Image (tube, rainbow, N blue to C red):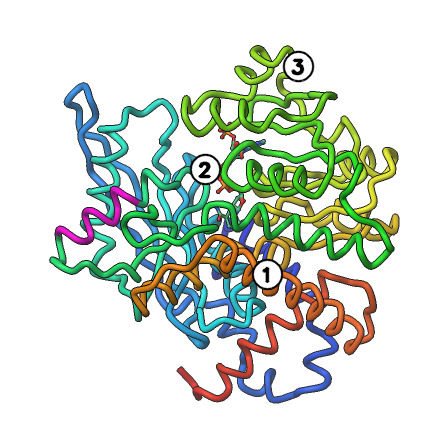
Amino acid sequence: LARNAGEREFHQAVNEVFESLGPVLVRNPDYADAAVLERLCEPERQIIFRVPWVDDAGDVQINRGFRVEFNSALGPYKGGLRFHPSVYLGIVKFLGFEQVFKNALTGMPIGGGKGGSDFDPRGKSDGEVMRFCQSFMTELYRHIGEYTDVPAGDIGVGGREIGYLFGQYKRITNRYESGVLTGKGLTWGGSLVRKEATGYGTVIFAERMLGTIGESFDGRRVVVSGAGNVALYAIEKAQQLGAKVVACSDSSGYVLDEKGIDLDLLRQVREVERGRVSDYAERRGAVYVAGRRVWEVGAHVALPCATQNELDDDDARTLVASGVKVVAEGANMPTTPKAMTLLQEAGVMFAPGKAANAGGVATSALEMQQNASRDSWSFEHTEERLATIMGDIHDRCLATADEYGVPGSYVAGANIAGFVRVADAMLALGLV
Ligand code: NDP
């Protein structure tokens, strides 16, 4: 704790994983002998840098940039960049730590890392965002590469930002190295389905969970938090599977639309106009509730797709009272530890983000495959690969939970399966 003082979210993420690992350590003492747990908690490399840029008024602004290269036992560091005012080392380290296990769970050859900045893209002009991204990459470029570290998007970093970052990388290095970033646009090395992958993958995972009790999304009431990249495509896939998605949110409040969310309008407001869910509610004639959390509307399936610790024990009680059957995390660590315990004790099926939202990074790995072979696959083929990967992760979580005596626990299954894959690679590579 003293070694990582004040990094609250990092402590939370580490505790959540380590609580599951008792049975593994008993079965294989080599992990303890080689100090695998201690090594897993210490990032291989942490980079913190100054990001100076000039705003539209001509004033100089300074932000702080981060890249934490956590673990490369399985492949190059891989994980997104987050631009949000709340970003500090503790957030980047929690995300990087989670990413190590998530990436291991996909079965693909990718290590774990994460980065970002306390820059707030909200309210910034396009030119300001571009100048910030160029300055950020002017430092970051020397640390990344297709065989070293491959960043992608996260909160506040979408197609526009990846474009500016890639443009600056190309300019500085004089290399069209498509594999250095994922989440690229389709005309410059991107992959079909990457944009949709995290949201789609979460819903595909939740559909498999429902399948274990003979249910499906068809006709079910669904609530999604957030209205960003993950939320929008979780809504789309849930609707395609016949669900009625009645609510979504942003950090100001939520919209309740009992007719079912009109996705075309929501995408127009969010992706094109960069507006708020309150704008959607006004145009749609739906109910807008400011300053409250979306969970109070109740649902059969709840999909937290916004940010960390956005579903607490009070929210969990409300969801349980509304008869919720499945909670699958599209976001990273959106459920507090207390809420997670409460949901599981109430018999709610609960899937942690490192399993349920792994479709995004898995499709990033598919983007890297296409870049390496200078190929581009069809939407159908790529979506089929995503569905297979999500199904495999689902089954691996359940099989591992069974094997280690905690049947039905997606949390334990995901933590143990991810840990064993990365820990075995670390043992094989020696003390590095
Ligand atoms: P976006 O920036 O596209 O969207 C984030 C959304 O969450 C926005 O609608 C934002 O609202 C909302 N939000 C942020 N804070 C809160 C809050 N406290 N309460 C309610 N809503 C909030 O990010 P993404 O969709 O890409 O990421 C969402 C989550 O999914 C993150 O946890 C991320 O780490 C995770 N994730 C993302 C992946 C990806 O491929 N993009 C992959 C795997 C995980 P506002 O506009 O008001 O800030």
Please tell me which of labels 2 and 1 falls first in the chain: 1
- Name the spot of residue 147 as percent of width and height, x first: 30, 71
Tag in front: 3 or 2: 3
Task: Compare residues 351 and 284 and report the one nearer the observer.
Answer: 284
Whether the magenta-drawn stretch holds residue 294 is answered as no
- How far apart are labels 1 and 3 at the CA level? 41 Å
Task: Give the labeled residue for mark 1.
Answer: 14
Magenta stretch, residue numbers: 163-171
Q: Is residue 225 above or below residue 31?
A: above
Task: Compare residues 20 and 327 and report the one nearer the observer.
Answer: 327
Q: Residue at x 75, y 73 (%)?
A: 399
Horizontal side of residue 73 vs 285, given as left or right? left
Q: Which mark is residue 41?
A: none
Horizontal side of residue 9 vs 194, given as left or right? right
Please tell me which of labels 3 and 2 falls first in the chain: 2
Element marked by disc 3: loop
- Name the spot of residue 39 as percent of width and height, x first: 49, 74
Label 1 residue near ligand 1, CB within 8 Å: no
Task: Give the labeled residue for mark 3.
Answer: 286
- How far apart are labels 2 and 1 at the CA level? 20 Å
Horizontal side of residue 124 vs 289, given as left or right? left
- Name the spot of residue 362 as percent of width and height, x first: 50, 61
Task: Give the labeled residue for mark 2.
Answer: 86
Element marked by disc 2: loop
Tag in front: 1 or 3: 3
Element marked by disc 1: helix
